[in-house]
Image (cartoon, rainbow, N blue to C red):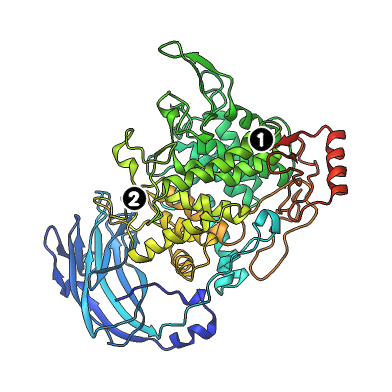
Amino acid sequence: MKYAFIRCGLLSLALCSSFAHSQVLQEFELENGTLLGGHTGLIDEPFEGVGVYGNSDGVSTVAALSGIPGVFALTVTGASSNDSTARVGVYLGGKRLGTPGFSGTSATSQTLEFELTQAPSESELRFVLETDDGSNDTLLDAFQLERLGDIPPPPPPPILPAQGAFESQQYRNLFVEMGLTAEEVEARVNAVYDQLFHSEDLENEALFIPVGEDMAYIWDTGNNDVRSEGMSYGMMMAVLMDRKEDFDRLWKWANTYSLNREGDMKGYYAWQVTTDGQIRDKNPAPDGEEYMATALFFASHRWGDGEALFDYNAQANILLDDMFDNGQTRYANGGILESFSLFDHNEMQVVFSPATPSDRNWTDPSYHLPAFYELWARWADDNNAFWLELAQSSRDFLKTTVHPDTGLSPDYAYFDGSPHGDYQNWKDTFQYDAWRTVGNAAMDYYWWKKDDWQNTYAETLQAFFMSEGVDSYSSLYELDGTPYENNADHSPGLVAMNALASLASNEPAAWEFVEAFWKTPIPTGKYRYYDGCLYMFAMLALSGKYQIYCPDCESKPSANSSSLSSSSSDSSSSAVSSVASSTSNSSSGELASSSSSSQGSILGGGVGFNLLLTLCGLLFFRLCGKRKLMA
């Protein structure tokens, strides 16, 4: 049997017309099913049903299918033993359909939609607890099974743009390309942001926690602390959503409580801080600084610069200078002089951490952000050639660390791409950090389109997850595709990143990942932090809102059926592609970078300049004291 979720809202009304008259096939009270043993038991509160308390507990019955292929919906009613989200795995004929979750102690319903290309008249339906962590119990009431209609014909394959978004000034809205309206997508994006940032339900929904009148932090709800990763993610989300107050609150909190002002890690942000501002680990996780620097540039270009801490352009350059070399040194054992850059200047790669010699000798593939490095090469006051070379080096590195058959990459790797498991022995496999790697590559392809291998990478990874079941794959794997031990979760964060990979794919399967993401609820509950952040990034990217903001751009993005216009009416710049054209030959050239002022002009790139325009541009930048980049 082939299972794939379908959501009518993503298809045209014509394709969904066959769903107008659904047929209810079965309604069943689960206390009448076969209990699977373990601690499984019958309950009478909050309803008569089945309680599952430990992994492998569950209940099974026979699903009465129609014997006719089509699109089906299984609506499961259940509850949690407390306010946290309780889940259960659902299997039909041995194939996992999904993992619905129930928040709160009152009965709620979750619907799983799936295709059967070969539908038997009946098949075993099994509900199994697989994600027990002791925080709650799952209570199951009943289910309803419907046949919604015939399987619609698949949409045509996506068409990849001929140019990257930086050059074309076009930002795709894959949801609109799938059949939703721009208004529906706009409403959904705003709803996600408002829930994660401004929900009054701090226990189950919000990540953005205000502090006083002018600060806030992004709460890692699972660990009850604050990560530099989350702070930088929050800043990027806020600037992309044009929420300046949210951005400034986060930026001030980070500088008040996380910034190392002295010592070996001077200029970097402690990766782990308590919610009341006490540093737990002063060392940086470099992706935090990478996102912060880029978000600061975007803030400068979108809103203009203020003073001191809120002179965003100046702060971005200060941070980049420290990331390149924070000026701190010490003599280690053996008399070796150590420095603490976030990048290995010989390998031209971001390091896992600058804290120790061993941590500086390997990397985290998900920290490689060539899309950002390209921007730094154009906008930074210094080290422009370094940033440009770093972008290409990261692209080359990814080819060495991604498994050629599955597209899976390790959490940690040596500089040659081979998996690194010395620090934590499971980190040489596809774990939580590695979810982000394909998203980073897809964004690089989307913005710059400089490496066709990234298209191959995205399609290889999606083909692997299609083979695992687009709505039922696990979250953790060995690199060869073997599911990792004790791993039955189907995490929203991975669903989000696999959907984001569709920006670099022209295979029909790309739509199935976008569909699966659209129907995935906004993460809630204790472990919503990481899933929620990746969910928001994918929502921004797939809706056309993950845009490049540059200073004094000469035109706005072209409006078309698959891009949303900027919501800002008072921004100091528009989100378009802009770069000084290279006058290089095959081995060297010049790119003009922006000045430290957000109001500086940058020549628009994309179609090449004639000789006269090039010479005029270079003369203008020299007269204005602009820095030239030698590539």
Task: Examine the rendered structure and indicate whether residue 252 appears above or below residue 47.
Answer: above
Location of the N terminus by quadrant is bottom left
- Identify the secondary structure beneath mark 2: loop
- Residue 224 image-quadrant placement: top left
Tag 1: amino acid: Ala
Instruction: Relative to 623, say whether 80 is above or below.
Output: below
| Residue on which disc 2 sits | 479
The one of 148 and 46 positioned closer to us in this rendering = 148
Q: Is residue 67 left or right of residue 5?
A: left
Residue 436 screen position, x and y as percent? 46, 49
Residue 521 drawn at (x, y percent): 43, 62
Q: Is 288 or 224 nearer to us in this picture?
A: 288
Q: Secondary structure at mark 1?
A: helix
Q: Number of numbered discs present?
A: 2
Instruction: Estimate how packed mark 2 is, as few (under 14), some (14 to 19) or many (20 or more) residues with alpha carbons within 10 Å.
Output: many
- The type of residue carrying mark 2 is Leu
Residue holding disc 1: 385
Look at 58% across and 25% down and name the residue there.
Answer: 325
Residue 236: x and y in percent read: 59, 46
Q: Give how far across and how far down residue 347 sits, in percent.
A: 51, 33
